[in-house]
Amino acid sequence: MGLGAAIVVSLLNAVFGTITAWVLVRDEFRGQSIVNAVIDLPFALPTIVAGLTLLALYGPRSPVGIDVSLTRKAILLALLFVTLPFVVRTVQPVLLALDLEAEEAARALGAGEFRVFRSIVLPNILPGILSGVALAFARAVGEIGALVLIAGNRPFKTEVASVFVFLHIQGGDQAGASAVAVVMLAISFALLLLIGGLRFLATRHERA
């Protein structure tokens, strides 16, 4: 399930990471510095600590009354927590560098906010989004610590490829672990090549 979850999480990151970066750059609100610190938290925490934190918040003794432990939702939640910062932090500097005069000119000519975003903002930030997605995907595919506790690695239910490989290596099954690792490597490499190709197309006008 690891690769499928990594793909889903990467797509979610592309949307929610971009929205988060937009809010942090274009809006001002109380607690903005706290939100910035929370976004960077997965970079500072050891992954096993992130797993313990998620288990405490969304496990059997959840203080918010939400128990997703030992479910597929737990896998997505854990991966989102550790990968969201990659998209946010790659999109933020691009948004900061955008020329706001082009957006204002488009609005003055009667373009709506969606048209301004689609025609002016998105083409400029798309390379940053794709770079963040590639980083998030790579992190999600290899994530172990944040998953091993909250997901439980239940066969055919919450079993994740990275944890599967780790446990089989510890159990002495080098052949089985290697077989799964090679398949993961091939698929991951193909997907990263695809993302790289999309990024090349998105930046082609800058090279012209």
Image (cartoon, grey):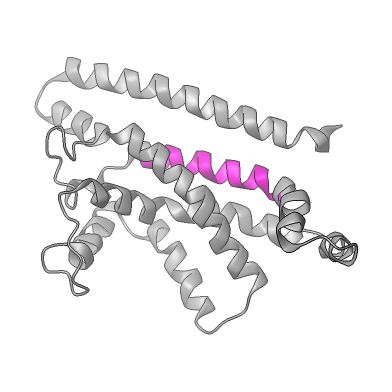
Q: Nearer the viewer, residue 98 or 112?
A: 112
75 displayed left or right of 39: left
Q: Which residue does the image show at 45% across and 43% down from the upper left? A: 10
The answer to whether 114 is drawn above or below residue 65 in the figure is above
Give the residue furthest to the bottom. 30
Q: Nearer the viewer, residue 82 or 60?
A: 60
Q: Is the magenta region chiefly helix, strand or loop?
A: helix
In the rendered view of the protein, which quadrant contains the C terminus? top right
The answer to whether 50 is drawn above or below residue 2 in the figure is below
Q: Which residue does the image show at 22% across and 29% down from the upper left? A: 165
**Residue 8: image location, x then y, percent:** 40, 41
**Residue 35: image location, x then y, percent:** 47, 72
In the rendered view of the protein, which quadrant contains the N terminus? top left
**Residue 6: image location, x then y, percent:** 38, 39
The answer to whether 106 is drawn above or below residue 30 in the figure is above
**Residue 88: image location, x then y, percent:** 54, 57
Reply yes or no: does residue 175 show up in magenta. no
68 displayed left or right of 117: left
| Tally of numbered tags | 0
Q: Quadrant of residue 169?
A: top left
Reply yes or no: does residue 130 show up in magenta. yes
Q: Which residue does the image show at 83% across and 33% down from the upper left? A: 207
10 displayed left or right of 146: right
Q: Which residues are magenta?
A: 125-140
